[in-house]
């Protein structure tokens, strides 16, 4: 199981996909624990996930 656009034999730090965190704006890269949910991941950390809940209009 891996990211569908990158063949497993090609995994290197340089080729892992990355996104920008919707809360802090910092870039973060793909992690194995996010393999199934990578398309739904929008925040880089638990701290940002909790911060998102506190913001008005955030997920409750």
Image (spheres, grey):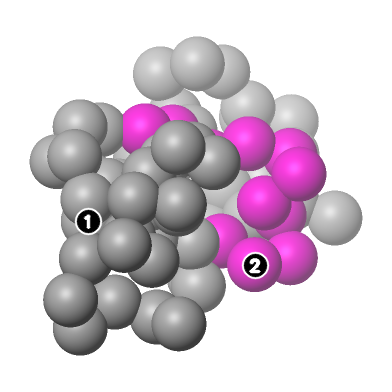
What range of the chain is rendered magenta?
A: 28-38
Give the crowd class for mark 2: few <14, some 14-19, many >=20 residues within 10 Å: few
Secondary structure, mark 2, is: loop
Q: Which residue is mark 1?
A: 22
Q: Can you give x and y, in whole percent of width and height, for residue 35 in the image? A: 71, 54
**Residue 52 shown left or right of residue 49 in the figure:** left
Which is nearer the eye, 43 or 16?
43
Judged from this view, the residue extending furthest toward the right is: 1
Q: Which residue is mark 2?
A: 37
Give the crowd class for mark 1: few <14, some 14-19, many >=20 residues within 10 Å: some
**Residue 37 shown left or right of residue 25 in the figure:** right
**Residue at (74% x, 31% y) in the render:** 9
Q: Quadrant of the C terminus?
A: bottom left
Q: Can you give x and y, in whole percent of width and height, for residue 2 in the image? A: 74, 51
Q: CA distance from mark 2 to mark 1?
A: 16 Å
Total numbered labels placed on residues in the image: 2
Indicate which label's residue lies in the foreground, 2 or 1. Answer: 1
Judged from this view, the residue extending furthest toward the top is: 13
Assess whether residue 52 is covered by the magenta stretch: no
Q: Can you give x and y, in whole percent of width and height, for residue 28 in the image? A: 36, 33
Cβ–Cβ below 8 Å for labels 2 and 1? Answer: no
The disc, 2 or 1, on the residue closer to the chain's N-terminal end is 1
Q: Quadrant of the N terminus?
A: bottom right
Q: Is residue 60 above or below residue 29?
A: below
Q: Residue 52 lies in what quarter of the image?
A: bottom left
What's the mark number on residue 36?
none
Secondary structure, mark 1, is: loop
**Residue at (40% x, 18% y) in the render:** 14
**Residue at (40% x, 80% y) in the render:** 59
Q: Residue 29 lies in what quarter of the image?
A: top left
């Amino acid at each position: 199981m891996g990211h569908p656009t990158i063949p497993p034999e090609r995994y290197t730090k340089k080729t892992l996909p990355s996104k920008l965190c919707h809360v802090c704006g910092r870039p973060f890269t793909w992690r194995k624990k996010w393999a199934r949910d990578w398309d739904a991941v929008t925040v880089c950390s638990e701290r940002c996930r909790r911060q998102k809940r506190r913001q008005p209009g955030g997920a409750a």
